[in-house]
Image: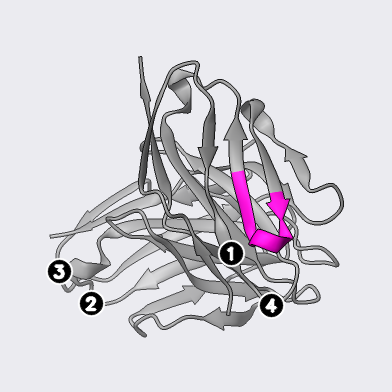
């Protein structure tokens, strides 16, 4: 069974459109994240959710909004897509606790904005 | 805020040769340190992690890393590389926040090329 899954794997869309990327984890973790990997392969955290509460909100445009319908899902919604949004987006999850337990990553979603 | 520096953007190694990938971090306390590998078109796979204790940690695929507090380093090593090791390698630091939901801070990655 896949621990962290994302759909779709590839997403090609036009500028100005609104799109969503879904993420599900079956690990029972209490925290989920979204990362963006740009064309130079630099990974940067975008959001994290813990118990349905947004914990980190980096300096990302407000066109991006994470939505968590339940503890196992953290979907990423993007409005008014721009060319610069083209990247690979990774979902991850972690169980918080005394130690900084490792994060498990999904396979990524490659978003291409035309 | 923490930061991670991977000074080598690209490294080329002959198959069978030894490998060392450098990683330096900046953090006010003892950090949690990770090495991830990303094969072309794939997601991130954890190679190894350091939390505390023995400063030499063993990982999967024959990799090891040594935490050196005095040098703020966490270099990744492998005694003999295989062609399948060609990939992008990321060093990352996680903040100790009492269980708070902090994300990982990644270095910019080192692209490993294996020569036959």
Q: Are marks 4 and 2 in contact (CB under 8 Å)?
A: no
Q: Residue A33: give its label.
A: none
Q: Give the quadrant of residue B20.
A: top right
User: The disc numbered 4 marks a residue on which chain?
Assistant: B
For the rendered model, the colour scheme is: one colour
**Residue A31 on the magenta span:** no
Which residue is depicted at the point 54% across and 25% down?
B18
Measure the alpha-carbon separation of dots 4 and 1: 10 Å
Q: Is residue B50 left or right of residue B63?
A: right
Helix, strand, or loop for circle 1?
Answer: strand
- In front: label 4 or label 3: 4
- Is label 4 in a helix, a strand or a loop? loop
Taking depth in this image into account, of B17 and A93 the one nearest to the observer is: B17
- Mark closer to the chain start, 2 or 3: 3
The foreground one among A45 and B33 is: B33
Point out the frontmost of discs 3 and 1.
Answer: 1
Q: CA distance from mark 4 to mark 3?
A: 42 Å
Q: Which residues are magenta?
A: B67-75
Horizontal and vertical percent position of residue B76: 59, 41
Q: For mark 3, name the chain.
A: A
Q: Position of residue B21 (x, y in %)?
A: 51, 42
Asked where in the image residue B32 lies, by quadrant, the reply is bottom right
- Can residue B75 be seen here? The reply is yes
Q: Quadrant of the N terminus of chain B?
A: bottom right
Asked if one can make out residue A72 in the rendered structure from this viewpoint, the answer is no
Q: Does residue B33 sit above or below A9 in this rendering?
A: below
- Between the C-alphas of marks 3 and 1, the distance is 38 Å
Name the residue carrying label 1: B25
Residue B69 falls left or right of residue B19: right
Q: Which residue is mark 2?
A: A80
Q: Which mark is residue B28?
A: 4
């Amino acid at each position: 069974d896949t621990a962290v899954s994302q759909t779709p794997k590839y997403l090609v869309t036009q500028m100005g459109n609104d799109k969503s990327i879904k993420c599900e984890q079956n690990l029972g973790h209490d925290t989920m994240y979204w990362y963006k990997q740009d064309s130079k392969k630099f990974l940067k955290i975008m959001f994290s959710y813990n118990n349905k509460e947004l914990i980190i909100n980096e300096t990302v445009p407000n066109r991006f909004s994470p939505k968590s319908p339940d503890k196992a899902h953290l979907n990423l919604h993007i409005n008014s897509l721009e060319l610069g949004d083209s990247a690979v987006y990774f979902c991850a999850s972690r169980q918080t606790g005394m130690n900084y337990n490792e994060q498990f990553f999904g396979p990524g979603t490659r978003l291409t904005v035309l | 805020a923490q930061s991670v520096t991977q000074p080598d953007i690209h490294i080329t190694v002959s198959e069978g040769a030894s490998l060392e990938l450098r990683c330096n971090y900046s953090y006010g306390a003892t950090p949690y340190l990770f090495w991830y590998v990303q094969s072309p078109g794939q997601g991130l796979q954890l190679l190894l992690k350091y939390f505390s204790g023995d400063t030499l940690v063993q990982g999967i695929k024959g990799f090891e890393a040594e935490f050196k507090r005095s040098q703020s380093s966490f270099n990744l090593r492998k005694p003999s590389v295989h062609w399948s090791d060609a990939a992008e390698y990321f060093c990352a630091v996680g903040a100790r926040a009492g269980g708070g939901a902090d994300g990982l801070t990644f270095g910019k990655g080192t692209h490993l090329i294996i020569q036959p």
